[in-house]
Image: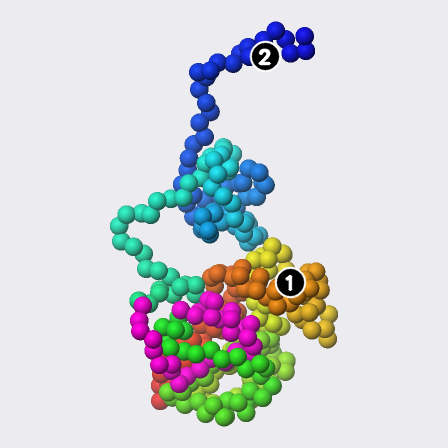
Amino acid sequence: MRYGDDVLSGFHRNSPRRVVPEHDAEPGLVVEDVDSGFCGEIVGFEHGLVVLEDRHGRRRLFPLEPAAFLLEGAVVTLRRPKPAAGPVAPRRTASGSVAAAPTRAQVARASRIWVEGVHDAELVERIWGDDLRAEAVVVEPLHGVDDLAALVRRFAPGPERRLGVLVDHLVSGTKEARIAAAVDSRYALVAGHPYVDVWQAVKPSRLGIEEWPVVPYGQPWKEGVCAALGVDHPARFWRRLLGRVSTYHDLETPLVNSVERLIDFVTTPAAD
């Protein structure tokens, strides 16, 4: 017979089942997802899922299912750690600052931070919004900086009315560098980043790509990127990109440094 005399031979109802050990999903622990083979460091949790980040900075979310991970080559069941007893660590904002205690609405400062466009403003709000509200600083989009010197003169910055300006593609020898150099008020600070567009200041790994596509000179950068990535709707792509940004770690350092400089400048009284 094909199956022998007894298909249940060797089976014992009371045989012990294999026990898969459980392990706390502590940040910094390196594990591998059994099904996909994705290996990465535990960096947090989102919507009840564990977030793994590999050595290239790519992040993926996985459910905490039984026997779903390998830890040092052994199958384990990850569990979300219980909150540690004792003093509660201060909450951090997306920018890494210690979150201020809730306060009543404030009257905005006379000082302002200007950015080039709506996308710049939305990105700054996403990361530094809590900090700016705590400092009562308003961010306003300019929709371009070609007339920046005249706009600054009209704003009339002063000791209690300081102005910070965030400029894209602020690189020596560029049009943007010449525009920035024309601003000569001691109460106005122009800071920027080297990227053609603020999209490019988001780390490409947040989209699962190694680097942003190279767009030929003379071609609009956003449209060129969307074409290279096979995207039909730039506005929809921006919402997707913005949704991948949750902390300052998701942004390139030059942008982070410039925004921090501007916030410090407009919130620190001038020393006359």
Task: Pick the quarter of the image with the N terminus.
Answer: top right
- Crowdedness near tag 2: few (<14), some (14–19) or many (≥20) residues, C-alpha within 10 Å: few
**Residue lying farthest to the left in this orientation:** 86
Verify whether residue 109 appears in magenta: yes
Residue 178: x %, y % from top left: 60, 85
User: Is 55 rendered above or below residue 187?
Assistant: above
Above or below: residue 186 compared with residue 3: below
Q: Which residue does the image show at 48% across and 38% down from the upper left? A: 65
- For image coordinates 57% across by 38% down, the residue present is 35
User: Which residue corresponds to mark 1?
Assistant: 212
Q: How many labels does the image show?
A: 2
Q: Is residue 66 above or below residue 182?
A: above
Q: On the rendered image, what quadrant is the C terminus found in?
A: bottom left
- Quick one: SS at disc 2? loop
Q: Measured from the top left, where is residue 105 in percent x and y? A: 34, 75
Task: Give the residue type at disc 2.
Answer: Val
Horizontal relation, residue 206 to residue 25: left or right: right
Q: Please, is residue 227 above or below residue 152 in the view?
A: above
In the image, which residues are magenta? Answer: 102-130
- Tell me the kind of residue under disc 1: Trp
Name the N-terminal-most of marks 2 and 1. Answer: 2
The residue closer to the viewer here, 57 or 242, is 242
The reply to whether the magenta stretch includes residue 231 is: no
Left or right, 132 with respect to 205, comes to: left
Q: How far apart are marks 2 and 1 (CA)?
A: 59 Å
Q: Name the residue beneath numbered marker 2.
A: 7
Q: Where is residue 70 in the image (x, y as percent from the top left)?
A: 51, 36
